């Protein structure tokens, strides 16, 4: 049997998680992307629309579509940013806060299920590996001219 590559394991696992979250989100009449957005908006002070995309790792055009849909469903409202007249703050409505709690409970249930099936050491190792992968990518140490990633 061929050895599974790291990127394959990451991609296959994330696709399974995405599918699971989308199936669960259907029960609440929404999508994983909307749930993730609800969790990314500060429930008390709102979040600048320009900060939301980078916070979520999402392109502006995709986020714009999601925000428009969320606004139409009454989950969010846009308000002028009092600290920046050009900016907009995204706030959750009462309905949005309710749906945020639904999203939060789904995420916490998933986390609890994983924690109940792996040891603390396994979970710690998982987070160490993901941190290392993110650092290698951020520091541009994967694809370099000298190809020595052990620096």
Image (tube, rainbow, N blue to C red):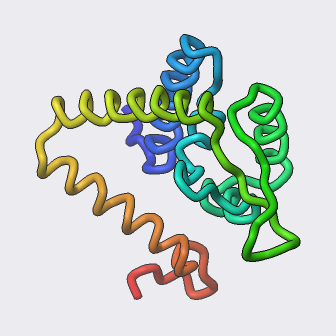
- In depth, the one of 80 and 64 nearer the eye is 80
Q: List x then y, in percent, for residue 5.
A: 45, 47
Q: Is residue 53 left or right of residue 104?
A: right
Looking at this view, name the residue that lies furthest to the top.
27
Q: Is residue 39 above or below residue 125?
A: above
* Count of numbered marks: 0
Q: List x then y, in percent, for residue 100.
A: 52, 34
Q: List x then y, in percent, for residue 83.
A: 73, 76
Residue drawn where x is 32% and y is 28% of the image: 109
Q: Is residue 67 above or below residue 110?
A: below
- In depth, the one of 18 and 104 nearer the eye is 104
Q: Quadrant of residue 107?
A: top left
- In depth, the one of 14 and 94 nearer the eye is 94
- In depth, the one of 121 and 64 nearer the eye is 64
Q: Quadrant of residue 149?
A: bottom left
Q: Is residue 40 above or below residue 109?
A: below
Residue drawn where x is 16% and y is 30% of the image: 116
Position of the C terminus, as image quadrant, is bottom left
Residue drawn where x is 17% and y is 48% of the image: 122
Residue drawn where x is 60% and y is 81% of the image: 144
Position of the N terminus, as image quadrant, is top left
Q: List x then y, in percent, for residue 77.
A: 75, 43
């Amino acid at each position: 049997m061929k050895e599974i590559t790291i990127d394959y394991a990451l991609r296959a696992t994330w696709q399974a998680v995405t599918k699971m979250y989308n199936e669960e989100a259907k029960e609440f009449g929404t999508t994983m992307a909307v749930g993730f957005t609800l969790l990314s908006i500060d429930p008390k002070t709102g979040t600048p629309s320009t900060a939301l995309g980078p916070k979520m790792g999402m392109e502006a055009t995709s986020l714009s579509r999601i925000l428009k849909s969320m606004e139409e469903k009454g989950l969010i409202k846009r308000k002028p940013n009092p600290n920046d007249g050009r900016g907009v703050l995204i706030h959750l409505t009462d309905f949005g806060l309710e749906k945020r709690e639904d999203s939060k409970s789904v995420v916490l249930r998933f986390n609890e299920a994983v924690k109940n099936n792996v040891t603390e050491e396994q979970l710690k190792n998982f987070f160490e590996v993901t941190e290392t992968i993110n650092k290698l990518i951020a520091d541009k140490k994967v694809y370099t001219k000298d190809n020595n990633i052990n620096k």
